[in-house]
Image: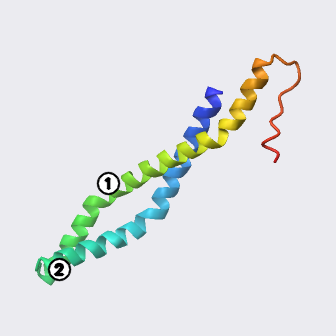
Amino acid sequence: ENRVRQSSRWMVAALASSLALVTCKEPLRATLTSHIWQMLQRMGIREEALEQSVNAEVAENLDFCCTVIEMHAIEKAVASIDEAIQNSCMVRRKHAESRSTAQFVDTTVLQ
């Protein structure tokens, strides 16, 4: 049971991490660029320095923001998979505790 739980957690963590990174990086870059551009414009930064400053700030903060999003996605995915396999693990545990000689078949998977 612990192997199933740990394996499923590793699997969804890897998938959630990759998917979050692929889907968030470019939209996040565009949003950060827009917000930082507007903020620096309001501060009165010259147009020539504005683009360079925005690009530097986005480059500096993008990886951190992506890491935060990845961590959140992993947490949610692990909680979700734990909830999803909880019932199946309980049924399997009850079967093992009954010491039945019948082969275990999880019928909830087939539904």
Q: Nearer the viewer, residue 73 or 22?
A: 73
Residue 92, how many percent across, how many down? 74, 28
Which residue appears at 57% of the width and 46% of the height? 80
Residue 66, how many percent across, how many down? 38, 56
Q: Nearer the viewer, residue 87 or 5?
A: 87
Residue designated by label 1: 64
Which residue appears at 17% of the width and 80% of the height? 41
Residue 83, how many percent across, how many down? 61, 42
> In the image, 46: left or right of 27?
left
Q: Residue furthest bottom?
A: 47
State which tag comes first along the sequence, 1 or 2: 2
Element on which disc 2 rests: helix
Residue type, numbered disc 2:
Gln
Residue designated by label 2: 41
Which residue appears at 46% of the width and 57% of the height? 21
State the image quarter where residue 87 is shown: top right
